[in-house]
Image (cartoon, rainbow, N blue to C red):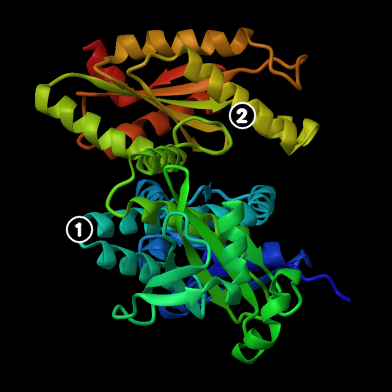
Amino acid sequence: MKKKGIKVLVYHKGGQERDFLESFFRKRTDYEPAYISSSEELNDALSRSSHDVLILESPDGTAALDGDRIDIPAIALVSEDIPGGLKGVVKYNIDCYLISPFHQEDLEHKLRSAAENKSWFRRLINEKRDLEAIIELTYLISSTLDPREVLYLVVRKLSEIIDVSRCSIISVGYGEKRYATVISSFEDPGISNIRLDLKKYPEIKKALQSKKPLVIKDAQNDPIMSSVRKLIKPLGIQSIAVLPIIHRDEVIGTLFLRTSRTHKGFTDREIKLCTAIANVSANALYNAFFFERLENEKSRLEKLAITDYLTGVYNIRYFYNRLEEEFSRAERYDIPISCIMLDIDHFKRINDTYGHRVGDLVLRQFAQLIKRHSRKSDVFARYGGEEFIMLLPQTGIEGAEVEAERLKEFTRVHRFKGIEKEKITSSMGIACWPVHNIQTSDDLITFADQAIFRAKKSGRDRIVISKKLRKKADG
């Protein structure tokens, strides 16, 4: 059987980038590209989630997207309008992108990384959605003082998230062993106070005794259900989940779910989500301990959202947010602000000689080295590939030069693991406001980028200040 390739959705309307992509995929049989050129086709394909990776141009491609997120790993091609393209990358949290001129080995590496990270990406998306559902449920619970309405909100929300045929909250009195009561069911808010004989629900009885979640994948063959097998057979019940609701170490009820899904039972993710919701239900209006855990998880996701996964420093999205804030503050109070663009010299040679795994290790070490020796007030982020960028609030040209020289020296003397015999150097470009021709925050980055280009073109391992800056600074 022929091995299936990585399914790549390519959204592009033509031009040199399209030629580059077609040339790339023409030589490789382990990818299955699908080309589309209209925004309708793009959003329809994304809604079906049938591809592994998305490639699109930015900013024109990202502007065609509906909504505010992409649910598959994406790679953006940024060419003519680089600031605008990077803003599109930031808006949609696109971690992988290529800046013109494009190279096939770079695209190959990013495609492989995106494909490998697909399962992680999906898991993160699901975790984020589950967290959003729990946050929304916590808000709904706090919006009413009616306990029965609270419990109905719980089962209704849960039924929206998980495909179930029955979702109920069952109450058990303290010390009760024979009977339980259905007090809320998602089918009808009016359903309540239905008495259950626990002899006919051995799964609920077992969960009450153990005080642990009980998951039955095959209700027709599980030994626990042997006494009621004939009763449940006509109902088509396939899987069952019973989640104890515990308050002050006492089981006061269960979250009871049934499904007729034949292809699979409840997943670990669904059980974890149900357990979390059962905990919310236990206190009905407010659960301080659970809320604390929720806030910690929210903080973790927020940190993840502003961090570059490979290097551990800020990503370009966070940098742009801070740039807007700091540049506005500089203009308001007429205080200088500088920008340093940093690049590892001859980084491609390291990848070619030692492999991309060692190259990634060097990138992370370099990023952490600069981060460790930068000032607390500076904002240091990964710009793309082996390029990094640093914002220096309240810092003029002289101060930025001193800072760049200091960081450059730390790089020169550091011995990087994996390539101990190599000497790593860096090139840097500096721009500063207020000086000639810098009108916007984007100009600050553009001038620094032009300066680092001159540094690399003139031999690397040096620091260059934008020509337009130097003219006024020397004046």
Q: Which comes sooner in the sequence, label 1 or label 2?
A: 1
Left or right: where 251 falls relative to 402: right
- Residue found at x 18% / y 25%: 330
Of 83 and 475, which appears nearest the observer?
83
- The answer to whether any part of residue 88 appears in the image is no
Q: Residue at x 53, y 58 (%)?
A: 74
Q: Which residue is mark 2?
A: 363
Circle 2 — which element? helix
Say left or right for 435 vs 80: left
The percent position of residue 162, horizontal first and vertical second, equals 50, 70
Task: Please name which of the two marks, 1 or 2, marks the residue nearer to the observer.
Answer: 1
The percent coordinates of residue 264 (x first, y second) are: 67, 73
Question: Which residue is farthest bottom?
Answer: 234
Q: Find disc 1 in the rendering and name its residue.
A: 143
User: Does residue 328 appear in the picture of this structure?
Assistant: yes
- Mark 1, Cα crowd under 10 Å, few <14 / some 14-19 / many 20+, is few
Q: Residue at x 44, y 58 (%)?
A: 129
